[in-house]
Image (cartoon, rainbow, N blue to C red):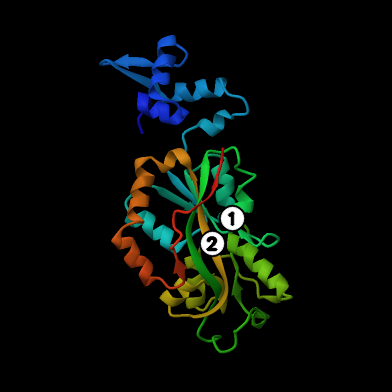
Amino acid sequence: MSEFLTTKELAELLRIKERKVYDLAASGDIPCSRAMGKLLFPRQAVNAWIAENSSGFSPQALAERPAVFLGSHDPLLDWALRESRCGLATYFDGSLDGLDRFERGEGIATGLHIYAPAREAWNLPAVAKRFETTPAALVEWAWRDRGLIVGSDAADTIKTLCDLRGRRVIPRQPEAGSHALFAHLAGEAGLSDTDFESLPAARSETDAAVAVLEGKAEAAFGLKALATQYRLAFVPLIRERFDLLVDRHAWFEPPFQTFINFCRSVTFRNKLDELDGYDASGFGRVHFNGL
């Protein structure tokens, strides 16, 4: 990314008309330089200028976000980011971890599936108040079928949550949205952590399914798509919405636009058709707009 902004880019950043940018430059109110008859605006100096002239703004919030996708691991999202060759790196370590890192400016987007039982709602309660003054949008990715992924040896005996008592169940890390969701559903069924044999946590959806496939666990709370892929039994429990919280400026930059355009391609649709338990008919629907 260039260290200088053009007149058009600065107008988009400040959400003003280009004519106003020329006025600011002519009056000396904003740092700029002229090269080959064009105005150029040093990115770092502009960020500092905005911070100095704003109230309730944090200089840290204006720092350039690294091109990293954060949050919860989703197999389809992971594949699309790689297959699109958009250049975005990934750091998937759970919905809650992603929100914390996004708030600290450590990435341009984060995936999440956080359930609010009291409101029977997905993701919006976790985002709305926390990011109401952040230029970010909560955009729908897909609905996913989630339940128990069960190994072949236990497929005939695990039909409900209550059948997990005394079983080897692979957990997820505390920062994962599925960890909190499983605790909620297990609690409704009268179960607690002490009812399951303790195992080290799996840090991704794929790791959880593979632990069952390899016989390390008898069951995992995972996605139907992975159960089908690994030819494992599946007990459906809930349908969840997976969303993306995206920095609005980054949305219009080439890396994210490359990713979005790929998600509208035939290649992506063909992949979606191969996966069991996904519904992406609402892809792109905006559920929240900050600031």
Q: Given contact means CB atoms under 8 Å apart, are the residues at marks 2 and 1 in contact?
A: yes
The quarter of the image holding the C terminus is top right
Q: Residues within 10 Å of mark 2 (few under 14, many from 20)?
A: many
Q: Residues within 10 Å of mark 1 (few under 14, many from 20)?
A: many
Q: Is residue 243 left or right of residue 261?
A: right
Amino acid at dot 1: Asn
Task: Please name the residue that numbered disc 2 is placed on.
Answer: 241
The residues tagged by marks 2 and 1 sit, at their Cα atoms, a distance apart of 8 Å
Q: Which mark is residue 159?
A: none
Q: Which mark is residue 123?
A: 1
Please say whether residue 199 is visible from this viewpoint. yes
Amino acid at dot 2: Arg
Q: Nearer the viewer, residue 262 or 206?
A: 262
Residue that lies at the very extreme toward the right in this rendered image: 190
Give the x, y percent position of residue 42. 40, 22
Give the x, y percent position of residue 191. 72, 74
Please say whether residue 192 is visible from this viewpoint. no
Please determine whether, in this image, residue 69 is positioned above or below residue 38. Answer: below
